[in-house]
Image (cartoon, rainbow, N blue to C red):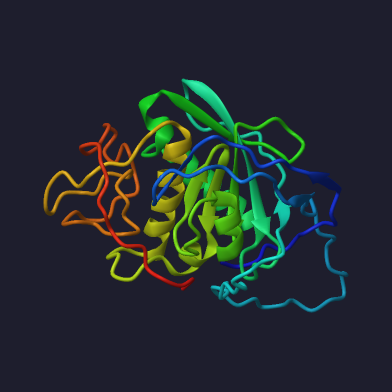
Amino acid sequence: MPETAGRAAAVAVLALAVAGALTACEQQPVAAPAAGPVVMAIGEATSVPPPPAEAAPVTQAAPVEVAITFPRTGSGQWMFTPGSDEVAGKSGKLMRYRIALETDIDGVGPATFAKAIRGILGDPRGWTGGGEWRLQQVGPGDDADFTIYLATPASRDKLCGGTADGYTSCRNGSNVVLNVARWANAVPGYGAPLDVYRQYMVTHETGHRLGHGHELCPGAGRPAPVMEQQTLGLHGCVPNPWPFPNGKSYAGPSGEYDDPIPAGDS
């Protein structure tokens, strides 16, 4: 994902307690971690000065997709993005969320990532589609109902608690933890473009924060419910990242499969 042009200097440093009584993820529920990371708030430049009048015109090439690189074990330092005035959804309870990226991740621009998250959570096919929820991204110093982390595999394990797998994403209390390995590479054999998988992982883990449990494939060839553990297997369904794919609620039977979790961070 291309970097955006403007990143300003860090504007604040604060400590964040990572708390929560229940983890809902693509494994079994586990206990919450006892402590959290140090975080930094970042902003981006609001304007760019014009080039000198005598400068020759520059022809710019089309944006190029930047490779996403990351270590298995990150620093546990987090860049929090500024908030937004946008509120997704027209009715329902307002849930505020923050966005943080681990500093060791390269190839993901914070502003671009935040825009992608807002786009997914604000899509009318997403959780705001039923009129039960409204969603708004807020800044690091604002009260928030949950925080979305883009984390290296080892930091994913710390934030998620329980048995470390370095592979899945999770929801642990008020933490929605996106494993950067999945954001960068999706999963083998998913059968849909990377953007669709990213929509799924954000919507699935946020769905846990909004109180939804796991669901099963309702029938071969049908769209997978967004709360099916699509990372671990589709069980005859086809990929689907939305709870309201056609403007109507779509779900499957409650339950989960006993799928093995692949090894590694790829």
> What x and y, as percent, mark residue 150?
59, 56
Residue most toward the left? 220
Q: Is residue 220 left or right of residue 192?
A: left
**Residue 253 sits above or below residue 204 on the image:** above
> What x and y, as percent, mark residue 140?
74, 41
Q: Is residue 146 left or right of residue 80?
A: left
Q: How many marks?
A: 0
- Specify whether residue 152 is in view: no
Q: In which quadrant is the N terminus drawn?
A: bottom right
The image quadrant of residue 103 is bottom right
**Residue 3 sits above or below residue 169 on the image:** below
Residue located at (85% from left, 60% from top):
49
Residue located at (83% from left, 62% from top):
50
Q: Is residue 111 left or right of residue 241?
A: right
> What x and y, as percent, mark residue 57?
74, 76
- Specify whether residue 103 is in view: yes
> What x and y, as percent, mark residue 250?
25, 36
Residue located at (60% from left, 55% from top):
158
The image quadrant of residue 9 is bottom right
Nearest the viewer among 259 and 69 is: 259
Nearest the viewer among 214 and 245 is: 214
